[in-house]
Amino acid sequence: MRILFCGTHFPAGPELLRQRLPAGDELRVWSSGPLLEQLDGVDVIMPAMHRVDAAVMDAGRFRLIQQWGSGLEGVDLEAARARGIWVANVPTSGGNAESVAEHAILLMLALLRKLPEAQANVRAEALGAPLGRTLRGRTVCLCGLGNIALALAGLLRPFGVRLLGLSRDPASPRAGRFALDACYSYAQRDACLAQTDLLVLCLPLSAATRNLIGAHELACLPPGACLVNIARGGLVDYHALYQALASGRLAGAGLDVYWQEPIPADDPILALPTVIATPHIAGVTDRSYAEIADALMANFELLRRGEPPLHRAV
């Protein structure tokens, strides 16, 4: 079996797969040149951050498009369905959900304690500043109530926060598992956001959720609120977020995902002192990656037997 991993980002993934592949299987990492010229003999293509459209599918004879992780927005699912190509991902659960939730906590604490300013003060030999804010007593809104939000809710409870939820279906029995203080529908989000000190985005990107958080939603947040995005960059209107941060109305943003990935180093939003940015690493942990690699190996074995993969989208 020949597997093609698209791109050199997320380098720990291919290495973990190589450690698990049986003798005779080959894993290639595409690093340069036209992708269409790399597809000869490939059985499985792993998109990573690359777009897999009809042209890519027609250029190869691969039988499976297998994502490392959950996001499939870069795959043309209708084109795959029309060509009889299986598409699968690894749902955000277990170690991955817990890892992303831990990273959200890291970003929240770093924003509240003004970590960039604190680090600058160390270099300036200044003690006792800045004045931070505690997480305890804040109101945190989880936008999207999936597995990541569920893991995050469990981590947040001991901090003594007030926990709100935003969901398409706040009356769902699933919402009851979060032990929320209140749960709102998207139609009620203005009232929810008006109470929110920390807005954490935990939902997938789709046509319905693109730019879900725009100028209006950011204006509904109280002055001094912060936004944390560990989901997808396209959930937030870039220009609206930049203006809210630059004006000082929004106290800060913790970003692990971006509108273009990788985000250009000279992007203006990265120059704002109230932005804490990490390079899409929320789910990049030893436990998360080991579980993903094991799930992929199970799907490769199913493919070898001619059976449909687990967690199939097409």
Image (spheres, helix red, strand yellow):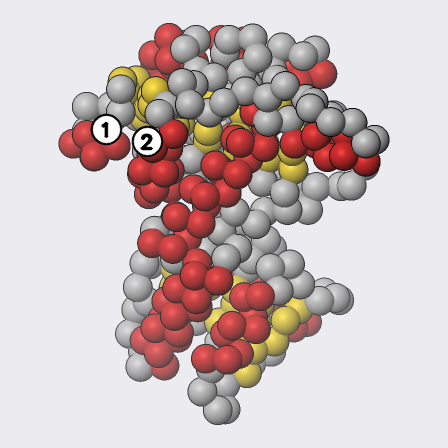
- On the image, which quarter does residue 81 sit in? bottom left
Q: Residue at x 62, y 10 (%)?
A: 249
Q: Which residue is mark 1?
A: 179
Q: Is residue 40 left or right of residue 80?
A: right
Q: Are marks 1 and 2 in contact (CB under 8 Å)?
A: yes
Residue 304 position in % (x across, y down): 36, 81
Residue 188 position in % (x across, y down): 34, 12
Q: Residue at x 65, y 37 (%)?
A: 277
* Residue furthest to the left: 173
Q: Which residue is mark 2?
A: 157
Q: Nearer the viewer, residue 56 or 236?
A: 236
Q: Earlier in the sequence, mark 1 or mark 2?
A: 2
Q: How busy is the neighbourhood of tag 1: few (under 14 within 10 Å), some, or many (20 plus)?
A: some
Q: Which mark is residue 234?
A: none
Q: How busy is the neighbourhood of tag 2: few (under 14 within 10 Å), some, or many (20 plus)?
A: some
Q: Residue at x 71, y 67 (%)?
A: 31
Relative to 257, does residue 124 appear above or below in the rendering?
above
Residue 141 position in % (x across, y down): 40, 23
- SS for callout 2: helix
- On the image, which quarter does residue 60 sit in? bottom right
* Amino acid on which the number 2 mark rests in the picture: Arg
- SS for callout 1: loop
